[in-house]
Image (spheres, coloured by chain):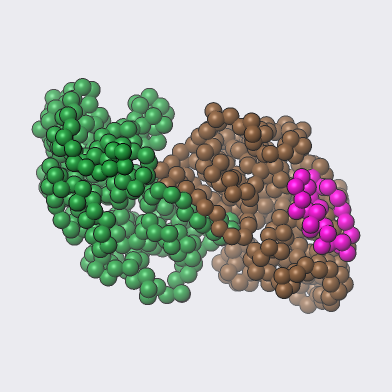
Chain colours: A brown, B green
């Protein structure tokens, strides 16, 4: 089968063996989504070698549990040991022995087939199209913010970054807590996607000094070096900065500001899939507007280059 | 009167006017303590100009409230506007208009006299000597950790840094929550001060790899560049890193680690004085062992140089 591989510092679409079911299910991929993390991995982040991709929707081709076969599914990307405290509690996201689809020790979704434990799979409601279902993973990550920061309808929240992650974060927050959430970004066209959903948006260059120290929670979803410093400027004392972006290398920060203003900085990575699938089923989140193009998997290398271009949001791959 | 001043990038002991009472109290300083923040200010931190020093014990010389006159006191260092939400709730620590003794817009304690609002003053119990009472402010800062991180007797806590701040932090934590707290530092002689109080200590160069990801809470009190990275190594996923040190300049950090392991980073600055005074009264904290020497205020410049030397903990100034 074809797979988009990163090996020896080289991206290529290669022919590899189709995975077999064994104790895990084999899923035929219908669509996969290119994430910034894929681009970061291709820059050396996480030291991963293998098939890239962790956002997908597919159909179960083979599985130890017969009832799953033929079901359209999405899949949680962390596969745990099943025995540690987290796994025993149904949460493999911090299992120290975990593999992560297309990120840590497990071939990913930019392929014709992938393999995942059956506990990771969730059936997709018929009313949710493939093009929407493929956003379950990044939308789940956006939904995970409220696991990490106390946010209710009275919380003043700003999201920095109008890329696909930021756009999903503001929409998830608005849908989950109906909060007064503001999106700050550099691109009028991208901000417009959120504005159409009734979300307040601010063009970065028009950001008023009067908003300094005005927000209870700021979500950094730009991945840009300046995002961290801007977030500290926008936060009230004892406010919470949620870091969503993973990127390679180090960031410099003004640690004294964190101490003096007693800021909370919380990292937020993966969210649970069920709340995200529910938002997609309710049609409360616009993901279609985030899709720039769908390319054949065979064009995977060019698709990743395209996804890295300024102004591009989501690029999908179809095997 | 004499005062240790930092002006035009220059430290000196100068003759200045004695402050007058007005709406605030005038306190005759008995002892003041040199803090690392004083040294950071002399390197440009906080852009402060004026009399340094924020750790003191003194006697009220004059005040609008007669009953205070002659009382031996310590004083909370943040002086608020009295009207904002925080001040109205009795907490001026984050008042946006606050002045801070010897740090922001208010002459400090390395002087013969200082001025503070009467609400900032706390009487010192007779049983607490001047040499102990002068530690109220830094001990309060150490006591403030439990305001910012959930810590109980079952929490595994590590404190990084065996300087005066770290030694106060471990002792405060042990006294407040009786927790299994471990001090990690570079100096056997400094670690010994904590060990004598029954605190587990580890010499940094003997730190075992097996302690990686073992702690629920790590307090960074070293102010060293490596402290942040070490803290991230020691923390379990979703653990809490408490930042205590303020220093000028930026620190580089591996933000992806914070995201992937979903770490909480919380800044912690000033604590409340009452719990610290109570610990001093109960004699549950050894502060005497932290005193290296007491110098006359007139030798203030040399005293700051001495305080900056490796191996030195607390230097006190006596006007």
Dividing the picture into quarters, in which one does residue B297 lie? top left
Occupied quadrant, residue B98: top left
Residue A291 is left or right of residue B309, and the answer is: right
Q: Position of residue A64 (x, y in %)?
A: 80, 73
Q: Is residue A312 magenta?
A: yes
In which quadrant will I find the N terminus of chain B? top left
Residue B238 sits above or below residue B300 on the image? below
Residue at the spot 56% in from the left edge and 67% down from the top edge: A85
Q: Nearer the viewer, residue A208 or A77?
A: A208
Q: How many marks?
A: 0
Which quarter of the figure has residue B259?
bottom right
Where in the figure is residue A197, as x and y percent of width and height?
A: 75, 34
Q: Residue sitting at 37 percent across and 70 percent down?
A: B204
Task: State which region is magenta.
Answer: A290-315
Residue B78 in magenta stretch: no
* Lateral position of residue A145 relative to residue A284, left or right: left
Q: Nearer the viewer, residue B297 or A188?
A: B297
Is residue A65 in view? no
Q: Quadrant of the C terminus of chain B?
A: top left
Horizontal and vertical percent position of residue B282 = 19, 52
Residue drawn 26% across the image and 34% down it: B107
Q: Position of residue B85 (x, y in %)?
A: 42, 29
Viewer-nearest residue: B43 or A296: B43
A115 or B82, nearer to the observer:
B82
- Can residue B93 be seen in this snapshot? yes
Residue at left 58%, top 45%? A226
As drawn, is A106 to the left or to the right of A95?
right
């Amino acid at each position: 089968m074809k797979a988009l591989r990163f090996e020896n510092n080289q991206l290529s679409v290669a022919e590899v063996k189709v995975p077999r079911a064994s104790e895990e299910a084999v899923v035929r991929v219908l669509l996969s989504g290119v994430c910034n993390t894929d681009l970061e991995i291709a820059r050396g982040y996480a030291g991963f070698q293998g098939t890239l991709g962790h956002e997908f929707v597919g159909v179960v081709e083979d599985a130890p549990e017969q009832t799953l076969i033929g079901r359209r599914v999405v899949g949680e990307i962390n596969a745990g040991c099943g025995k540690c405290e987290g796994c025993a509690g149904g949460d493999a996201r911090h299992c120290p022995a975990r593999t992560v689809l297309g990120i840590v020790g497990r071939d990913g979704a930019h392929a014709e087939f992938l393999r995942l434990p059956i506990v990771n799979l969730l059936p997709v409601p018929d009313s949710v199209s493939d093009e929407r279902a493929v956003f379950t993973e990044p939308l789940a990550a956006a939904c995970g913010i409220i696991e990490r920061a106390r946010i209710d309808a009275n919380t003043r929240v700003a999201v920095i970054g109008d890329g696909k992650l930021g756009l999903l974060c503001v929409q998830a927050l608005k849908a989950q807590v109906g909060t007064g959430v503001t999106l700050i970004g550099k691109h009028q066209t991208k901000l417009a996607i959120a504005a159409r959903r009734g979300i307040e948006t601010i063009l970065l260059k028009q950001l008023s000094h009067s908003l300094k120290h005005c927000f209870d929670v700021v979500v950094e979803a730009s991945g840009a070096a300046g995002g961290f410093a801007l977030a500290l400027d926008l936060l009230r004392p004892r406010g919470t900065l949620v870091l969503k972006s993973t990127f390679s290398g180090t960031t410099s920060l003004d640690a004294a500001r964190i101490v003096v203003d007693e800021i909370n900085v919380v990292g937020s990575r993966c969210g649970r899939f069920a709340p995200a699938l529910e938002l997609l089923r309710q049609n409360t989140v616009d993901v279609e507007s985030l899709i720039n193009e769908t390319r054949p998997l065979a064009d995977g290398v060019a698709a990743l280059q395209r996804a890295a271009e300024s102004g591009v949001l989501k690029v999908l791959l179809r095997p």
